[in-house]
Amino acid sequence: MSAMEPHVMVVTLPTQGHLAPLTSLAHFLAASGIPVVLVRSARAHVLLQAASNEAALSVFSAPPFASFPDLVNSTSKATIHIEIVADGLPTDPKQRLERGTILGSFDTIEKGVEELLEKRMVEKQLPKCLILDSFFSNLGQRVAVKFRLPWMAFWAGSASVFSLSYHIPKLLAKGYLPAKEEGAMDREIDFIPGLSPIAVKDLPKGFNVELDPENNPALPLIRNLFENVKQADRILVNSFFELERAVVQSLREAGLHLDMVGPLFMMHSLSSVSNHVTAAASLLPEDTSCLTWLDKQQETSVLYVSFGSIAPMEEHTLVDLAHALEASNVNFLWVIRPDCMSGKASLQQLLPEAFMEGMQDRGCVVPWAPQLAVLGHRSIGAFLTHCGWNSVLESLSHGVPILGFPQDAEQNTNLRFVVKDWKVGLPLFSEKQQKEPCNRRSMCSQAECSIAEIMRGDVGTEARKHALEWRKAAVEACISGSSLLNLQRIANELITGHLA
């Protein structure tokens, strides 16, 4: 990259769910003719290289978006320059990372990015704009002042969860938080513009709704994040307008400059970017042998089971799920990550006795799967997921119904929208079983029934119909509609240097 060449710097988190969409965004911009500096944390860079056999290059080219002939500068191509900053995180994929450990790495990453900008300022290579994950909003405000740079905040979740987080002060003022009294968790929140009524119990688990504000570290973190995000020149959301129309319009009316730019994985896959570059967004090696296994299965006959890249899964949960899958008589593709092995040397040691041998005719278990290829496969009938936003969005965009088993963060809230608003799935466990302690045999029985319902029941049939409708809307948003138009406008503004 030559001195003074105008470019954009994109800064990602060290986790799969945030890294992948921002990487797709970086490739879109580069394919539009805008040089990009993509900043990765050290852990992410090591895992990406190991997972994809990516050459140890610091610069590579992104081809133009041949699929989109009307895209600005569609005949040009630009480079993506990789920069690496320290994060203080371990690089062993078998080592489970707690959320607190990941959050603790943010200060180290921000310091590295700020030092990188200082170095580039001396070299007269400051970017024309920064695109930062929203969790780096403190950094966004600092560099906006220090380096006089415009910046955009990237929100990796839904606009609906964005709105719930944005309205925490109102939830506190109206006495919905903390929710400690009897019946407080069942109170309905019906005053957030653009959102259908939602119970307090369906607010993100990360809010820690039962804690007093003075003892709840999550609340000041979220409030600070949104105070900074409001100052960004743009807020880019990895969702599409048609899915969350009312809430997006309400947030815009409140003065927030929201641009819906997703599903970004679809923007990436519709471009002429090579498979090598696409694979480089996975932090774990993808076992593509499962695709050959899927080729042998009947249409919509397979339940895909995966709980993302971080969600912790206890050994007893995996064992119970194995019993439910065995009893359901449903074919399945099951991802069990290396860090979920609980110190066991093999799956035979982890799962129930003789499970692997007994299920080999109708089951396939892999450490990590090429999820987009799996969800797009004709044999997939439903997706049993933790309901992380990327997984929900990818499932919707492929027309695949969802069976939800949320674990952490905002996953329970995503499931609520999946079931009640978008009508594309159902929970693995009933509300009663989630509230009351049940014995493991009862839980296994409920899971078995839910699996049968989503795969073969009337609810599953209806959910599949709605999912296919959302798939059509997502494809239109990316090929010729709202998300593509937003990205084209942003690319034009970056090229001209005028963020309207």
Image (tube, rainbow, N blue to C red):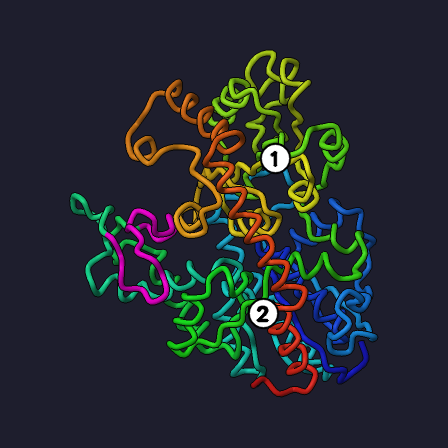
341 or 299, nearer to the observer: 299
Secondary element type, mark 1: loop
Asked if residue 15 can be seen in this view, the reply is: no
Asked if residue 78 can be seen in this view, the reply is: yes
Question: Which residue is located at x 63 percent, y 73 percent?
Answer: 485
Q: Residue 497, located in which quarter of the rendered image?
A: bottom right
Question: Given this view, does label 1 or label 2 mark the residue nearer the observer?
Answer: 2
Q: Position of residue 352 (x, y in %)?
A: 55, 16
109 or 348, nearer to the observer: 348
N-terminal of the pair, mark 1 or mark 2, is 1
Q: Residue furthest left?
A: 182
Q: Is residue 197 magenta?
A: yes
Q: Give the residues drawn in magenta, as a range.
A: 188-208
- Residue type at the position of mark 1: Arg
- Residue type at the position of mark 2: Ser
Question: Which residue is located at x 49 percent, y 29 percent?
Answer: 451
Q: Quadrant of the C terminus?
A: bottom right
Question: Which residue is located at x 66 percent, y 72 percent?
Answer: 9
Q: Is residue 442 magenta?
A: no
248 or 175, nearer to the observer: 248
Residue behind mark 1: 337
Q: Residues within 10 Å of mark 2 (few under 14, many from 20)?
A: many
Residue behind mark 2: 482
Viewed as shown, does residue 449 lie left or right of 40?
left
